Amino acid sequence: MRLIFLGPPGAGKGTQAQRIADALNIVQLSTGEMLRTAVAEGTEVGKKAKPIMERGDLVPDDIVVGIIDERFGAPDCANGFILDGFPRNTAQAEALDKVLAARDLQLDHVVELKVDDEALVERITGRFTCENCGEGYHDKFKRPVKPGICDRCGHRKFSRRADDNEQTVRSRLEVYHRETAPLLAYYSAQSKLKSVDGMADMDDVTAQIKAILGAP
Ligand code: ADP
Ligand code: ADP
Ligand code: ZN
């Protein structure tokens, strides 16, 4: 199964991609995560991306398309993948179509998570992640069961993203509406688009997505 999860920052793409990828035994490919790793490692790509990400703008298309194309060649992608945060504009979507065609692959579904802008700011400013396993949490909507200890791996260190502040969130939302939202029409025209109510609680959203995919 090859899927795209589409939606504004904070819509729940990462949360749902992790769950669905586990359930279907496919991989989650987050360009944001790959870029943050490059920034942390101080690679050439990371040095270029850092100030752009801090502003909430899009990193140049050739960089992200290159990262994704290279990643598709890895053996763990053979069973399928979920693209989380890519493509983010029409040029990237067109490049993705070409990259997939060159590998003789097709997308199965593009899943849109619909969430109101006001809810997104609250979701993003309350977001934190386990430093060890990457499990996502929220100050209000998903606290660790035992305070300060990761539910998934037992670690005690969590981190918050530099770009998860209210000011940057506002510009990321603008970028989403201007650059990424046009992809809804793009994939609708390919009859690939399926929408879910991302305002529902996390388990409900997972169930909606599984129903679309015909997954148990
Ligand atoms: P979120 O999950 O909040 O939507 P991401 O982790 O997907 O955020 O992305 C964080 C930042 O990384 C973006 O604001 C952007 O600067 C950069 N980025 C991630 N994916 C892409 C992409 N496909 N094209 C350009 N920039 C990207
Ligand atoms: P994205 O990858 O689209 O940027 P995330 O999956 O990281 O979004 O979710 C953003 C924040 O909102 C996280 O802190 C997450 O725990 C929380 N969250 C995700 N889905 C829901 C939901 N359905 N209801 C409430 N909070 C949610
Ligand atoms: Zn953990």
Image: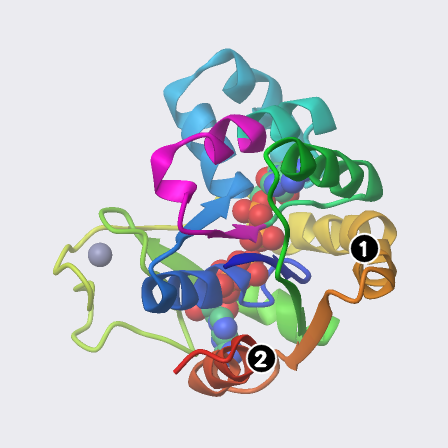
Closest to the observer: 210 or 41? 210
Q: Residue furthest top?
A: 44
Closest to the observer: 11 or 171? 11
Task: Give residue 146's position: percent from left, percent from top.
Answer: 16, 75
Point out the tag, 2 or 1, that comes first from the N-terminus: 1
Q: 40 left or right of 177?
A: left
How many C-alpha atoms fall within 10 Å of the one at disc 1: few (<14), some, or many (≥20)?
many
Which residue shows up at 33% across the image and 59% down it?
25
Q: Residue furthest front?
A: 104
Give the residues drawn in magenta, as a range. Answer: 68-84
Whether residue 157 is situated above or below residue 118 in the rendered picture: above
Task: Give residue 75's position: percent from left, percent from top.
Answer: 35, 35
Residue 183: mark = 1
- Disc 2, ligand 2: is the CB inside 8 Å? no
Whether residue 125 is situated above or below residue 90 in the rendered picture: below
Residue 88: mark = none
Task: Give residue 77's position: percent from left, percent from top.
Answer: 42, 42
Closest to the observer: 105 or 30? 105
- Could you tell me the amino acid type at mark 2? Ile
How many C-alpha atoms fall within 10 Å of the one at disc 2: few (<14), some, or many (≥20)?
few
Residue 212: mark = 2
Q: Name the quadrant containing residue 96.
A: top right
Whether residue 174 is situated above or below residue 19 in the rendered picture: above
Find out whether residue 133 is within the magenta segment: no
